[in-house]
Amino acid sequence: MPANPTTLEALQARFGELPTTEFREQTRVVITADQVPEVMGWLKSERGFDLLVDVSCVDYLNFRDATDRYGMVYQLANTLTAERLTLRVYLNDPNPTVPSVVPLWQGANWLEREVYDMFGIHFTDHPNLRRILMPEEFTAFPLRKDYPLQGRGERHNFPVLERSDA
Amino acid sequence: MAVEQLPDNVMVSKLDELASWCRKNSLWPMPFATACCGIELMATGAARHDIARFGAEAFRFSPRQCDLMIVAGRVVMKMLPVLQRIWSQMNEPKWCISMGACASTGGVFDTYCVVQGIDRFIPVDMYVPGCPPRPEQLIQAIIDLQDKIQREGTLNGSEFDTAQRQQPKRALVELPVYGQTPYFNPTSPLVKKL
Amino acid sequence: MATAIESENTQKQDYLWTLNFGPQHPATHTTLRIVLKLDGERVVDAVPDIGYLHSGFEKIGEKLDYNQYVTVTDRMNYISPMANNVAWHGAVEKLLGIELTKRCQYIRVIISELARISDHLLSCGAMGLDVGAFTFFLYGFYQRERIYNIFETLCGARFTNSYTRVGGVAQDMTPQVIEEIRAFLKTFPQTIDEMEGLLNRNRIFVDRTKGVGVLTREEATNFSASGPIARASGVTRDLRKDEPYLAYKDFDFQVCCATAGDCFARYYVRMAEMRESLKIIAQALENLPTGPVNVGVDERTILPTKQQVYNSIEGTITHFELVMLNRGFTVPHEESYLGTEAPNGELGFYLVGDGSNVAYRARCRPPSFIHFSIFPHLIRGHTLSDIVAVLGSLNIIAAELDR
């Protein structure tokens, strides 16, 4: 469901002109990294977007007509009116950082850890930012476009157990 | 002195064969179920295709009490040390069935984190192809393993010490990936030297 | 392997005992690891450690094209693979802007609901098995074998059947399949009654699950829970009713909710949802529309039938466009998301298209991942034996958790 026009008007009235697009009934609003806690907090408390559906990221390194390298995607939903809204935050190398939304929604805890693990984006004020899916010793960020699909040899770097050892 | 005729209730056999017969008919599996093949493993143990008919009644989850490890599902590089530790905790004689395409060769997942075949790191006795293999295929693998145990089994497990068993398998050689390695470069270490 | 995981908010006290609920043992549904801090039998803190089945699904999504990737989505929530297929292709068709035929929508609804029944049977069965009810598990498994028979007659594979394609399905539903589903619908309600009779008023089961792992309504939305777990806590959100996709608008069914939010409520909601699914399947079978199941050849997305290829120029062109290597379907240079009501929760795919028939980014929104992050909150203060009840009620599938 596209976002209610009243929500978009209220958003514009409060925060000024934000680039908004719509595609296949989804409304996407672009905000900057430092606006994240304010806008999200306002959306949660004033407009009733109490469900954080997803936090993810896209690496635009090989994308045609891309302006920034990383695009964060925050998907919010309103459980009472079934309204959805997508918020985009664009970040760049080096050191992509964005404030964490864990104080607002506890569900963002693991979702942000996964974005950190896969893309290397730092979330300030995150209670526990460490790797979640890859082993702790892993150094690269796998879902970036410059990391090859087969990896760089980490997957077979283990000792071999023969029949005589066991 | 004439050899007396043996009565009907006496059988003559080798001690090795007797031991192998006992071991093969009571293989207690240790299900190392990681992914979708784990569901087919459970289905094999369920009522319709019953693995208990073959002596594999007790699915003990403790490696100290099992002799057959069935690795069902993909093994990821984070899980591989766990697999190796459990394998070394099992007591001899022990056998390993690699169930499914992912455990045998990595399957669909030729990615940065999936081990391309557990036989690179664990000695495997039986491979079951399929994604996932039907329960009947797994039962066929257990029957074949039983035949293998009967054929090669010894009382004290000395079948595992032969030089032929200790040789690294050909699959352990890293194969060149099409399009990514200089396949026809004669100086490449990946091209096998004849 | 021996990494010291400092739990987030426990004081260092000597009498607390650290126990590793390791990645390999029977009560976790495949590979999860929880590091527990115990005070005798009470759990003071639980720190989950996941990633033991991370296979790089999202990276594979950037390599395989839209019809090849459906084989990989099967392997995500592998106890209801049809639901993942429907979700993936629903997202792809939303990005491409394709409108499915009515028959295809009904078929997808039928297989989604069969997948829902299959998933709930296994999740309740596994919960029962962990708590000690082995017969309950076997009853559930026998019915799942019947559903596997239906899927095998439909598309050849018991599960991990990559049945959907962009713009339709791989094979149409034959009358034989419809007969099998009807036979299943006739005898299945009796099985649910038997299963519920085993556990609903069973003193042991009720004592083990009532009041254990309580999740309140505000917490459920704060933790982004969805599906039966959120509905058991009082959140009345069901994507089949709130944002109808496929043909769910045409069916009359109810959304099952509970208010208690404990393990028993989650089990009860799942059993009730199975009955509602039966209703939906019965209605869909009665009203199954005739007509083509795949979209027409003008859309240039799905392989046409051989009659169309040989007898019409449109069919030939479409076949050529799809099969030749440097062509394929055209995808807008845009991003979209579709959330579907999978048996486990809201399963959605966020797709970024870049013009070619390989996705630029295929992000899966995994319900199990989000639900497992609720686990430490639910288990604090309970005993060691409640861990299996709570884990079973959350229905964590490791392949969806780690992708």
Image: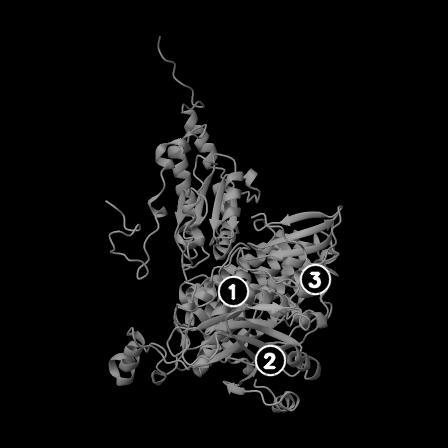
Within 10 Å of disc 1 (Cα), the crowding (few <14, some 14-19, many 20+) is many
Q: How far apart, in angstroms, are the residues tagged by discs 2 and 3? A: 29 Å
Q: Is C348 positioned to the left or the right of A35 in the image? A: left
- In x, y percent, where is residue A134? 52, 58
Query: The disc numbered 3 marks a residue on which chain?
Result: C
Task: State the residue lying farthest toward the top.
Answer: B1
Q: How far apart, in angstroms, are the residues tagged by discs 1 and 3? A: 25 Å
The number of numbered badges drawn on the structure is 3
Query: The disc numbered 2 marks a residue on which chain?
Result: C
Which one is closest to the eye, mark 1 or mark 3? 1
- Would residue B160 be seen by someone viewing this image from the given angle? yes
- In x, y percent, where is residue C221? 67, 73
Instruction: Provide the residue designation for mark 3.
Output: C377
Task: State the residue lying farthest toward the front.
Answer: A94
Q: Amino acid at mark 1?
A: Met
Q: How far apart, in angstroms, are the residues tagged by discs 2 and 1? A: 34 Å
Image height check: is C14 above or below C140? above
Image height check: is A97 above or below A42? above
* Cβ atoms at labels 2 and 3 below 8 Å apart: no
Disc marking residue C241: 2
Looking at the picture, tell me which residue is in the foreground, B178 or C163: B178
Image height check: is B174 above or below C94? above
Instruction: Provide the residue designation for mark 1.
Output: A118
* Cβ atoms at labels 1 and 3 below 8 Å apart: no
Q: Amino acid at mark 3?
A: His
Q: Earlier in the sequence, mark 2 or mark 3?
A: 2
Quadrant assignment, res C241: bottom right
Q: Secondary structure at mark 2?
A: helix
- In x, y percent, where is residue B6? 40, 18
Quadrant assignment, res C331: bottom left
